[in-house]
Image (spheres, rainbow, N blue to C red):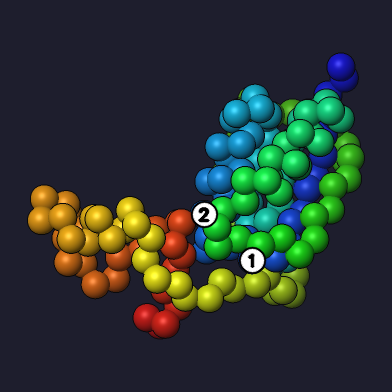
Amino acid sequence: MQCKTYKIIIHGTVQGVGFRPFIYTLANRYALLGTVSNSTQGVEIVVNASPETVQIFLQAIKDELPSLASIEKMITMPINTQSFTDFQIIATDEQGSVTVGIPPDVSICKTCEEELFDPTNRRYEYPFITCTHCGVRYSYL
């Protein structure tokens, strides 16, 4: 099947919740080549894939979404062919007006809690513990 280049723009709570590493993992699972980056609108993904594979990839994004993430809108469009040698998380595009959602503060996840109370862990009793699964603590700011 012929590969095409697709741009996928995802609007919603997709920043500060481990979304780009999640996309990176999915892209590698499906052997996709391309990029993922944050933008002022949300997250932008560019991939080379067959139409069938891109549909499977999009369904996996919806089905396996990180717990703190939410998708308001997902736009997929074919674009001019681009060449990639791997899949990468790239720098944020900061052009345009900011409309991205910010996730609420939530309690720490089970993994962070285990690290927090493990005397052998380097994060033992670290008061600002957080990870991409339980989110950034904006209340610190």
Amino acid on which the number 2 mark rests in the picture: Gly
Q: Quadrant of the N terminus?
A: top right
Residue 45 horizontal/vertical position (percent): 71, 46
Q: Quadrant of the C terminus?
A: bottom left
- In the rendered image, is residue 99 in sight? yes
- In the rendered image, is residue 91 in sight? no
Residue drawn at the location 89% of the way across and 40% of the way down = 78
Which of these two is toward me, 97 or 31?
A: 31
Residue 32 horizontal/vertical position (percent): 68, 29
Quadrant assignment, res 79: top right
Q: Tell me the residue that label 2 is attached to.
A: 18
Quadrant assignment, res 24: top right
> Mark 1 or mark 2, which has the lower sequence index?
1
Amino acid on which the number 1 mark rests in the picture: Thr
Give SS at disc 1.
strand
Residue drawn at the location 59% of the way across and 30% of the way down = 28
Q: Is residue 135 left or right of residue 47?
A: left
* Tag shown at residue 13: 1
Q: List the single residue furthest toward the left.
A: 119
Give SS at disc 2.
loop
Report the label total.
2
Q: List the single residue furthest toward the top.
A: 1
Mark 2 is surrounded, within 10 Å at the Cα level, by few (under 14), some (14 to 19) or many (20 or more) other residues, namely: many
Which of these two is toward me, 113 or 12?
A: 113
Q: Report how far apart the C-alphas of labels 1 and 2 lie in the structure.
A: 10 Å
Residue drawn at the location 67% of the way across and 70% of the way down = 100
Quadrant assignment, res 128: bottom left
* Tag shown at residue 138: none
Residue 33 horizontal/vertical position (percent): 67, 30
